[in-house]
Image (cartoon, rainbow, N blue to C red):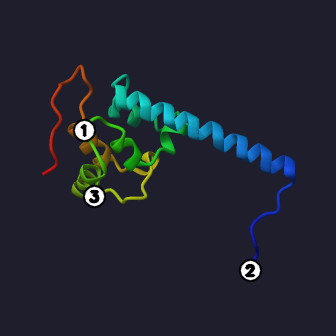
Amino acid sequence: MTGPPTLSAAERTSAREAALVARRQRAAIRRALADGSISVAQVLDRKDSDPVCANLPVRELLASLPGVGRARCAGIMDAVGISTTRRVRGLGVRQAAALRAMFPAKNDDDQMVEPQ
């Protein structure tokens, strides 16, 4: 059995800085979702071209939305059949479509659809 890779100090520093940048970019996406400047559909559309959107956990995506807390997030994910550890890149076509229907873009409709 092999252990974790041994990294030099420079490699550890580089990895730490890259992780910090990624966390800041994910936080920016969550803030944009919270203030309504981007929609769930836009994040889902960017999952193939933007690794930051792709690596965002679905629970963080949903919890960033106004009016969606931990309990409602868990209910939505359960209703749609999304694992609690799933990231945006791992969503299936039907799961992504269900989230788009629940949280339409502001120009489509101002009402959110409740999970059934």
Q: Given the image, on which type of amino acid does mark 1 rest?
A: Gly
Q: Earlier in the sequence, mark 1 or mark 2?
A: 2
Whether residue 55 is situated above or below residue 79 in the rendered picture = above
Mark 2, residue position? 1
Point out the frontmost of discs 1 and 2.
Answer: 1
Q: Is residue 1 left or right of residue 27?
A: right
Mark 1, residue position? 67
Q: Is residue 31 left or right of residue 20?
A: left
Q: Given the image, on which type of amino acid does mark 2 rest?
A: Met
Point out the frontmost of discs 3 and 1.
Answer: 1
Q: Earlier in the sequence, mark 3 or mark 2?
A: 2
- The quadrant in which residue 17 appears is top right
- Which residue is found at the position 18% from the left and 25% from the top? 110
Q: Is residue 12 left or right of residue 85?
A: right
Q: Determine which of the numbered discs, if any, sits on residue 81 in the image.
A: 3
Distance of label 3 from label 1 (alpha carbons):
21 Å
Whether residue 60 is situated above or below residue 1 in the rendered picture = above
Residue 31, how many percent across, how many down? 43, 31
